[in-house]
Image (cartoon, grey):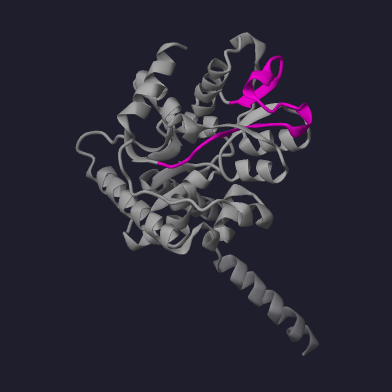
Amino acid sequence: MKINNILLPLLLAVFVIGCGPSKDEAERLSAQERARLRTLDSLAFKVGVQPSLDCLPVYVAHEEHLFDSLDVDVRLRLYDAGIDCNAAFKAGKLQAAVTDLVACQRMVGLGVPLRYVAATGTYWQLVSNRLARVRHIKQLKDKMLAMTRYSATDLLGDYAVDSAKLVPDHVFRIQINDPGVRLGMLLNNEMDAMFLSEPHATAARMHKHPVLMDSRDKDLWLGVVALYEPVPGDKHRRAQAEAFVKAYDKACDLINKNGIKHYAGIIHEYCKVDDRVIAALPEVKYKHASLPRMSDLEAAGRWLKNK
């Protein structure tokens, strides 16, 4: 009896193992699953986003399942810096991106097939380090200014320097692409001035760093949502783009109805700012998808022509 009690479990174990998939079969099934997932990802509508309040309608549409309700598989691709998002967009790895007109108009000039679907209300503020004792733009002489090349912040940097009649080479442009890193350098007194959009601009103001310039005062609205134009006849991508815009508009309506602080959890998750910053954010109204103004397109084009 004792021998049978010992052998029976062993025989069962051998039987179960023998009936299971072989190693080769398991690897084959795994490869098939990976191939299936790659196919689904290639067919999905991928949107490049950044840690910016400009992207909130896309975040809300995703988290509130507005894309799902329209039966479109939208997948967010999160980038810490706009330059990385734009590189992926330029390479055709994204079907849409929340970015800026300067970067997009440069891509258009390089032959990238883009189409604008939404002008956003984002703005950038030029913030100086309070310990640098810079209270006016003209005091930026021999100071370090953080920005990103060939972006809205690059254009606005020239606007700032020109407005103060400074010699361009007397302001040291330092390329810091990640806005979170940029803000950290301000808070750690490692940078004299920088351009920030929300929510990072609010974080800077909370720490008493003065605002020297605001892009809204220049009547420049450079935020944009752009699509990578599908090839003619691609009904799948066109249907996805239409559904994306519908969900975007619905998300704008929800945010305008509930207020941005209603989505504090989403802002915290995607923008990586704390509750104090979120509580201090100004109320923002979001517009339905509409084309950017011709004056903003022309401003970006003129600036790029002179670079």
Q: Is residue 215 left or right of residue 224?
A: right
Q: Please say if 224 is above or below 305.
A: below
At 38% from the left and 20% from the top, the residue drawn is 301
Between 231 and 51, the residue placed more toward the observer is: 51
Camera-side residue of 19 and 283: 283
In the image, residue 196 lies at what x, y percent? 59, 36
Asked whether residue 298 appears in the rendered view, the answer is yes
Left/right of residue 190 with respect to residue 89 in the rendered view = right
Task: Count up the numbered dots.
Answer: 0
Which segment did they paint magenta? 120-147
Q: Which quadrant is the N terminus positioned in?
A: bottom right
Tell me: 231 left or right of 144: left
20 is higher (above) or lower (below) than 184: below
Q: Tell me residue 145's x, y (percent).
A: 65, 23
Q: Is residue 122 magenta?
A: yes
Q: Where is residue 295, by image quadrant?
A: top left
Residue 60 locus on image (x, y percent): 46, 57
Q: What residue lies at 66% left-to-right and 11% top-to-bottom? A: 170
Residue 124 lies within the magenta run:
yes
Q: Residue furthest left?
A: 233
Q: Specify the quadrant of the image occupied by residue 292.
A: top left
Q: Is residue 246 left or right of residue 216?
A: left
Residue at horizontal 45%, vertical 26%?
103
Name the foreground residue: 183 vs 94.
183
Hey, which quadrant is residue 149 in on the image?
Answer: top right
Q: Depth check: give the residue in front, 302 or 273.
A: 302
Examine the rendering and report whether any part of residue 112 can be seen.
no
Residue 32 location in percent, x, y?
45, 50
